[in-house]
Image (tube, helix red, strand yellow):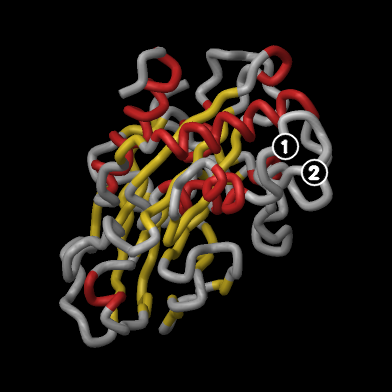
Amino acid sequence: MYSDSRHLSGFNQLNAVRLGAGAGLLAQARALDVSAQDHADYLTANGYNTAKSAHYETAGLPGYTGASPFDRMTNAGFAWYAAGEVIGDIGSSSSSSDCVGDLLDTVYHAVLMLGRYANVGFGYGTGAAAGMCTIDMGSLASGLGLQIPPSGAIVTYPFGGSTVAHGTFRVSSESPRVSTSLLPNATAGTPILVGFRNQDYVAGGKVTITQFTLANSSGANVPGVILAGADVSGSGVTVNADSEVDKSFAVFVAISPLPAGSYTVTLHASISGGRALALSRWTFNVAAP
């Protein structure tokens, strides 16, 4: 277990969200700690201008340990079957910044953080990059430990009864950015994520959404858009295919930031050949500023 407060806090924060969301707890993996910290050190030393993105390293530069996240995990000794990496608060010099929380207030990064992985490692920047965090997640090469909810279950965030610190998603700060044709403004509402990768889905089911809406405490629907991966479609509702979203996830994003208050999500969906979803409505809160 982590001995320093920052690593431990990030680990506990992410696991608390995953537990409430139904995604399952992550176990600390020392090899992923190594790969995550190696890359955080590389970014601290070299900045973030690389050939592809901040996830890639350039051979010959100080601290190089592998071109891609997958190379670095392998080189650190983690024999991954499925793996992913998120990096947050790039360029932040505040070591007290809520890097994990900021990453959860996104679309693409949050989907990865609530995915099927079983193991995790954390790395943090220093100096001018003190606020930056790198989180490496994976499951072992044999496929053992993949987190698959039972038949009828789904992953949801924000989950029922939870409170998020604010209702704003800084669209223009996430890279890649959600399409400007769908979310043209720099800010939008906190994304609502649903993961359908349960036992029914992995048995070969496809997902059809017939309703995915958000209502405020007065019962009025909040305008928004739905983004979804390749295995999720809509019937009677507009679902926008997005190749950056995991194929088993759908995300509702309100057009405008959500004011403080209570919100209710209504979801009607089916997974072909599987049990009816056990959850169709839940309420979460946005804290007052």
User: Which amino acid does the dot numbered 1 rest on?
Assistant: Tyr
Is disc 1 in contact with disc 2, using a CB cutoff of under 8 Å?
Answer: yes
- Seen from the viewer's position, the closer of residues 33 and 218 is 33
- Seen from the viewer's position, the closer of residues 260 and 147 is 147
Q: Which mark is residue 59?
A: 2
Q: Residue furthest bottom?
A: 273
Q: Earlier in the sequence, mark 1 or mark 2?
A: 2
3D distance between C-alphas at marks 1 and 2: 6 Å
Q: Which mark is residue 64?
A: 1
Q: Residue at 37% across / 75% down in the picture?
A: 209
- The correct choice, above or below, for 46 with respect to 161 in the image is above
Q: Label 1, secondary structure: give it.
A: loop
Q: Position of residue 17 (x, y in %)?
A: 32, 38
Let me know if residue 254 appears in the view: no
Q: Label 2, secondary structure: give it.
A: loop
Q: Residue at 20% across / 81% down in the picture?
A: 274
Q: Position of residue 19 (x, y in %)?
A: 25, 42
Q: Position of residue 223 (x, y in %)?
A: 51, 57
10 Å neighbourhood of mark 2: few (<14), some, or many (≥20)? few
10 Å neighbourhood of mark 1: few (<14), some, or many (≥20)? some
- The correct choice, above or below, for 139 with respect to 19 in the image is below
Let me know if residue 260 appears in the view: yes
User: Which amino acid does the dot numbered 2 rest on?
Assistant: Ala
- Seen from the viewer's position, the closer of residues 77 and 105 is 77
Q: Residue at 31% across / 83% down in the picture?
A: 205
